Amino acid sequence: MTADNVAQTVLVLGGYGFFGHRICAALARNPALRVLIAGRDITRATTAARSLGLPPEQAVCLNAQAPDLANYLRRLQVDILIHTAGPFQGQDYTVARAAIDAGCHYIDLADGREFVAGITALDVAAKEHGLTITSGASSVPALSSAVVDRYLPEFERLDAIRIGISSGARAPGLATVRGVFSYAGKPVRVLQDGSWATAFGWRGLERHQFPSPLGRNHGPFIPCGASIVLANKIADGVKLPAGAMPCMGLLSVAEYIDALRGLDVKEVIE
């Protein structure tokens, strides 16, 4: 809650989508937040709201590319905007800029390196408004960097890190599929043996068998954890850094797992 005990409004763009609906379900349990489910399809938004026990007026028809988006966010009195409507590869920062103009914090689930790294272009504007604008609140880089931060002190010397991600869904959402396949055959800068080199997407594939226990299929919730943590922190009055930044160093592994409590999501160390 805010200092005057008023719930903060969080708008989830793409709130009836694959990840967005799961984020809305988690945040709707926090009495310090009023959740708005937003997207271009008001019918789907209304259906999603009803499925979560929310009144239909918390379903919002919103076009992310509308020229008056900032004014619309002001009218809705949005405090936090969570952008889940990918794929983010090829998108610009229209939504993030509108959030700054409207005076609300911004969190997105982007995992495209260029998009996430480029969010710093909005750093000056974000600081001028005292807002947290963060990109990459997903499995990478939010969770991956939190894991590194957690275990780095355990090593006297750390030479290499290997990260594997497997889809937790038998049929991932269309935006996820588009984002993953957008790298096929494209040049990608990678760090190899301490030096930058060029690799090509979907070349050099390896098969990896994830060990037991993997538990029930709650994997689709994992990319949602970071945005849930950050929105709850803001609602609880935690002061996050002002500025525009990739989502790194803003949450811990323990907070991530706690956001997904009740699900079969655990940390396993071998």
Image (cartoon, rainbow, N blue to C red):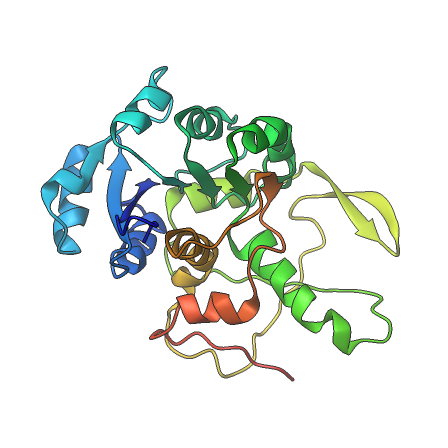
Image position of 26 with respect to 83: above or below: below
Q: Position of residue 210 (x, y in %)?
A: 56, 75
- Number of marks: 0
Image position of 15 with respect to 27: above or below: above
Residue plotted at (58% across, 49% down) = 247
Q: Nearer the viewer, residue 9 or 171?
A: 9
Relative to 168, 161 lies left or right: right
Q: Nearer the viewer, residue 210 or 119?
A: 119
Residue plotted at (66% across, 70% down) = 150
Q: Position of residue 81 (x, y in %)?
A: 38, 39
Residue plotted at (54% across, 42% down) = 134
Q: Nearer the viewer, residue 219 or 31?
A: 31
Q: Position of residue 93 (x, y in %)?
A: 51, 27
The single residue placed furthest to the front in the displayed view is: 4
Relative to 24, 191 lies left or right: right
- Quadrant in the picture for the C terminus: bottom right
- Quadrant in the picture for the N terminus: bottom left
Image position of 257 with respect to 140: above or below: below
Q: Nearer the viewer, residue 202 or 81?
A: 81
The answer to whether residue 6 is seen in the rendering is yes
